[in-house]
């Protein structure tokens, strides 16, 4: 078997800690709660947890506004809880990836309090201060510039005004964040997912962005301009490779980048000579329309764009995008699982997708997400994909004994972990497919070949490790005949998706897929 690092052959599971498991009845998930559920993750077969921020924070953006990079917010527990969780993770042979948020801090971070205290404060140029705003927009709506009365200048924030952007051209800022990275690496964490890594450096002349010719009224205001000067600047790659160098002082760690960019720019985040992030998140499956041609094209293009030696990765869901079950329809979640788990490289799963959780409707009066509050009703809210994990059929689904911070889905009595324990469940399909990546390493390391879209069937082959597999995914609404003589079916989206016809022909059902081991 080809030698691979844990972050190459592993499956990463994203935990949104507020919604995973509450241990103290306040309705908000916490670190002790995650510890209680580790055995579930072991049984699922995943290899690593990525936990989104749990650092001290005013929670204006639910933890992505960090007020202390080296602490734990009391809402989530204590440093002792963290150490216990890390120990629990490692003792089960799992890895832990933390979320690093270096682009911005909370406006309550001591660095910013100092920076805004006066124009000649030594930390003034830790942030981006200007006499005049330019046209850069906040990703959460409106101008990205906020006037500060005390010191008489504007500061820039890519997100909320409570999230001022750090000045990454300042070497002291770099040193401070690298120190925070070492704090956690020394404690034993296995890597970082770096938040909005492509936004970290901005044009040093603060030039205005050009208007976006395809902007239409009703779209988020951040789409009014093309982010030419406030994102993906050439200098960012220097910062990324410095981060990587910090990481490389420790054995066997991983740096993952959150990057929403078109293919060529995305690939640049592997770094020159692969000295950037090991895994620039690949969001093709979040963004590609669900049809065979578009998917085949996205898969092929991604693979041909990979730089030599670069390790691929695939993501199906995260805490910023509608859930897969809602995007493609609940009857297609099995197909989506087979697609995801038969592609090369590292796989990242979003909590709850393995049980087919859907977006939950959040009535306006209980909206939590600041993105939705700032630009209501245009579909930018992220609460629907962040609702509590339903564990069992009890009234509060085993998530909490209190009042959940976001409502459980209406279907939680039937759609929950305990209910889905039978062999034919979606949860068990996930377990089977994850296990298959271990028993058939060709699924992880094998070459990707013959990607094709024929009518409603998406197909591709994986070659290597002494075998050849063909994956056939029927995206259509009608069954299709299957040439059963080509090999042995080693996985199917459901036991009933294959039917034998009177003429001995085998049919693959609608929204069903199989993995076939080809005869050699
Ligand atoms: C990233 C996070 C998102 C957050 C934003 C600002 O996109 O995934 O949840 O709101 O950065 O930190
Ligand atoms: Ca709690």
Image (cartoon, rainbow, N blue to C red):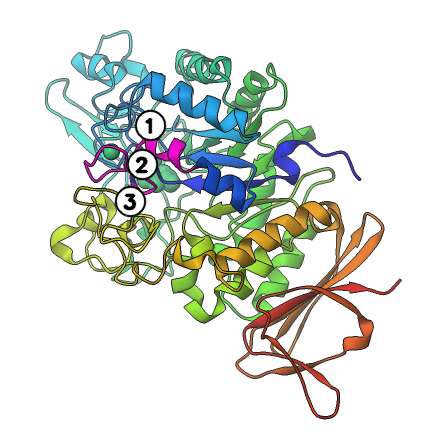
Describe residue 123's horizontal placement relative to residue 422 as left or right.
left
* Rendered location of residue 15, percent (x, y): 40, 40
Between tags 2 and 1, which lies in front? 1
- Quarter location, residue 131: top left
Q: Nearer the viewer, residue 288 or 153?
A: 288
Circle 1: is it few (<14), some (14-19), or many (20+) Cα within 10 Å?
A: many
Q: Is mark 1 within 8 Å of ligand 1?
A: yes
Question: Where residue 325 appears, x then y in whole percent?
Answer: 42, 62
Q: Position of residue 288 (x, y in %)?
A: 51, 61
Q: Identify the magenta region.
A: 19-37
The N terminus - image quarter: top right
Name the quarter showing ligand 1. top left
**Residue 104: numbered disc:** 1
- What residue is at 37 percent from the left and 46 percent from the top? 319
Q: Give the answer, above or below, for where 58 lies relative to 187.
A: below
Please give the label number shown on residue 158.
Answer: 2
Question: In this rendering, would 372 be left or right of 286?
Answer: left
Identified at 30% across, 50% down, the residue is: 382
Where 67 falls versus 474 (above or below)? above
Element carrying mark 3: loop
Cβ of disc 3 within 8 Å of ligand 2? no
Quarter placement of the C terminus: bottom right
């Amino acid at each position: 078997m080809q030698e691979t690092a844990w972050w190459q052959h592993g499956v990463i599971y994203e935990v949104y800690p507020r919604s995973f498991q509450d241990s103290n009845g306040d309705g908000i998930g916490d670190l002790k709660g995650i510890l209680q559920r580790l055995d579930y993750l072991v049984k699922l077969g995943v290899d690593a947890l990525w936990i989104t921020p749990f650092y001290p924070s005013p929670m204006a953006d639910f933890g992505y506004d960090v007020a202390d990079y080296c602490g734990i917010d009391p809402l989530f527990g204590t440093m002792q809880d963290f150490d216990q969780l890390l120990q629990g993770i490692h003792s089960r042979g799992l890895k832990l990836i933390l979320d690093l948020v270096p682009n911005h801090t909370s406006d309550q971070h001591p660095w910013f309090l100092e920076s805004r205290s006066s124009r000649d404060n030594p930390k003034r140029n830790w942030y981006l201060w200007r006499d005049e705003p330019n046209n850069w927009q906040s990703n959460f709506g409106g101008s990205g510039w906020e006037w500060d009365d005390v010191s008489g200048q504007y500061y820039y924030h890519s997100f909320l005004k409570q999230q001022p952007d750090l000045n990454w051209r300042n070497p002291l800022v770099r040193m401070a964040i690298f120190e925070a990275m070492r704090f956690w690496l020394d404690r034993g964490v296995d890597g970082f997912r770096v938040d909005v890594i492509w936004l970290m450096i901005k044009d040093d002349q603060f030039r205005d962005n050009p208007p976006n010719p395809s902007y239409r009224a009703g779209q988020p205001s951040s789409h009014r301009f093309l982010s030419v000067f406030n994102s993906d600047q050439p200098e960012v790659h220097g910062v990324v490779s410095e981060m990587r160098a910090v990481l490389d002082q420790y054995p066997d760690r991983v740096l993952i980048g959150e990057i929403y960019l078109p293919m060529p720019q995305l690939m640049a985040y592997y770094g020159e000579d692969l000295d950037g992030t090991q895994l620039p998140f690949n969001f093709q499956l979040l963004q590609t329309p669900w049809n065979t041609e578009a998917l085949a094209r996205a898969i092929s293009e991604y693979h041909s764009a990979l730089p030599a030696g670069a390790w691929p990765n695939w993501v199906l869901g995260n805490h910023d995008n509608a859930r897969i079950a809602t995007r493609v329809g609940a009857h297609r979640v099995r197909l989506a699982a087979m697609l995801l788990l038969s592609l090369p490289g590292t796989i990242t799963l979003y909590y709850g997708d393995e049980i087919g959780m859907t977006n939950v409707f959040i009535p306006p009066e209980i909206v939590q997400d600041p993105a939705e509050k700032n630009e209501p009703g245009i579909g930018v809210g992220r609460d629907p994909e962040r609702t509590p994990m339903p564990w069992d059929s009890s009234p509060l689904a085993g998530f909490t004994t209190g009042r959940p911070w976001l409502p459980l889905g209406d279907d939680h009595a039937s759609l929950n972990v305990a209910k889905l324990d039978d062999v034919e469940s979606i949860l068990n399909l996930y377990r089977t497919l994850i296990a298959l990546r271990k028993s058939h390493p060709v699924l992880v390391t094998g070459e990707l070949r013959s990607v094709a879209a024929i009518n409603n069937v998406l197909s591709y082959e994986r070659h290597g490790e002494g075998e050849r597999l063909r994956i056939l995914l029927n995206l259509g609404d009608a069954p299709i005949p299957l040439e059963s003589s080509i090999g042995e079916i080693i996985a199917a989206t459901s036991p009933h998706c294959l039917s034998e016809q009177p003429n001995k022909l085998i049919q693959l059902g609608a929204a069903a897929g199989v993995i076939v081991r080809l005869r050699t």
